[in-house]
Image (tube, rainbow, N blue to C red):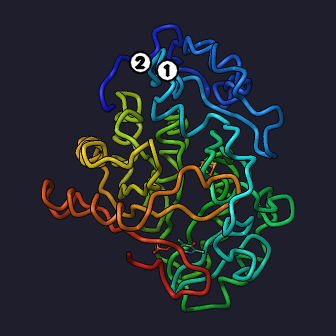
Amino acid sequence: MITGSPGARITPPSTQDDWRQLWRQSITDGRELLSLLDLDHLADRLPAADAGFALRIPRGFAARMRRGDARDPLLLQVLPQLAELEHAPGFATDAVGDLAAREARGLLHKYQGRALLIASGSCAINCRYCFRRHFPYGEEMAAAGQWQQALEHIAQDASVNELILSGGDPLALATSKLEELTRGLGGIAHVTRLRIHTRLPVVLPERIDASLVEWLQALPLQTVVVVHANHPNEFDSSVDAACARLRDAGVTLLNQSVLLRAVNDDADVLTALSERMFAAGVLPYYLHQLDRVQGAAHFEVTDARALSLIEAMRNRLPGYLVPKLVREVGGDPSKRPI
Ligand SMILES: *Cc1c(COP(=O)(O)O)cnc(C)c1O
Ligand code: SF4
């Protein structure tokens, strides 16, 4: 499940290319993806409609999938399944109470000291398990210079010392936009930390380019980047290089994974994931139980199984490589440990 040669026919892009061009060249057609992976016979199992959530995969990420393997753990994260269309009781469109925690346009303030800005509605990749797949980005995202209201709100609340950029994927914004945003933070002395939750260093590592690194280096804030990798096969030398560039810019690197049935609900895989991320200079932070979002029920793992997986990791790994197993419960003052 862990090793395997990447798809030879999908050539990983050169790191010289502009990341936006690579992003535009993403695979958006399920049939094309299956054909590149020699899995054409699965095309009849693609849902006719995209369940309101399009397929999108950077080619470099697809190149890390194994050809001819319908159970490839990277493929399963992104391939639309008929199961998404089934109604599952208990699975909702706003699974984590985001709309209730809204304080200003694009600003969610659920936990003490930390405010979360939905800085962008776009992602470089569309993950089928995503808890924000039904989020009304059109109204809520604070992108395109519309975050003035959010910044004013943070300026008035001295208890906020950490701003979290989330989305969507905040690194899907142009670096000039990110600069504009952090310039706006400049006058707010009580904000000392910036945290960026992003899947881009893993799914489109070319995004960590010279201008982004310059922006990070110049920030007068402690900066944490939480990459979202779920499986050790997501790492390759291009991801290692992106992580190294981030560390050179003084960033602390953490990882948050979602526990996903048939993708990473396996002690060997989770152990290998921790080892592999640490080799790239990334420490595990959270292992999340799935948010019960409509269309993602087929990824759910029971709490009992999740606990036994963590126990197995604890028996095999140094403590610092064992992530915290948590779930997000609307209305709680923090993520809830399981
Ligand atoms: C998850 C989350 C955070 C961050 O929580 P940590 O436990 O600090 O990682 C902050 N704000 C919101 C709205 C969140 O959903
Ligand atoms: S927000 Fe994160 S998990 Fe959701 S689709 Fe975007 S990259 Fe994937």
* Dot placed on the residue nearer the N-terminal end, 1 or 2: 2
- Quarter of the image for residue 224 reads bottom left
Mark 2: secondary structure: loop
Q: Which quarter of the rendering shows the C terminus? A: bottom left
Q: Secondary structure at mark 1?
A: loop
Relative horizontal placement of residue 112, taking residue 171 as reference (left or right): left
Q: Quadrant of the N terminus?
A: top left
Total numbered labels placed on residues in the image: 2
The residue at 47%/50% (across/down) is: 260
Q: Which residue is painted at 45% across and 42% down in the image? A: 262
Q: Is residue 102 left or right of residue 263?
A: right
User: How far separated are the C-alphas under marks 1 and 2?
Assistant: 6 Å
| Farthest-out residue, right | 139
Relative image position of residue 76 (x, y in whole percent): 54, 36
Return the residue nearer the eye: 222 or 40.
40
Q: Which residue is mark 2?
A: 6
- Residue type highlighted by circle 1: Ala
Task: Look at the picture and state if 245 lies above or below 191.
Answer: above
* Residue receiving disc 1: 63
Asked where in the image residue 156 lies, by quadrant, the reply is bottom right
196 sits left or right of 51 in the view:
left
Query: Which circle marks residue 337 in the picture?
Result: none
Tell me residue 145's x, y (percent): 79, 61
Identify which amino acid the numbered label 2 is placed on: Pro
Q: Position of residue 285 (x, y in %)?
A: 35, 63
Could you classify mark 1 by the number of other residues whose Cα lies within 10 Å: few (under 14), some (14-19), or many (20 or more)? many
Q: Are marks 1 and 2 in contact (CB under 8 Å)?
A: yes
Q: Residues within 10 Å of mark 2 (few under 14, many from 20)?
A: some
Residue 247 lies, in percent from the top left, at: 34, 49
Say which of 246 and 22 sits in front. 22
143 sits to left or right of 333: right
Query: Quadrant location of residue 276?
Result: top left
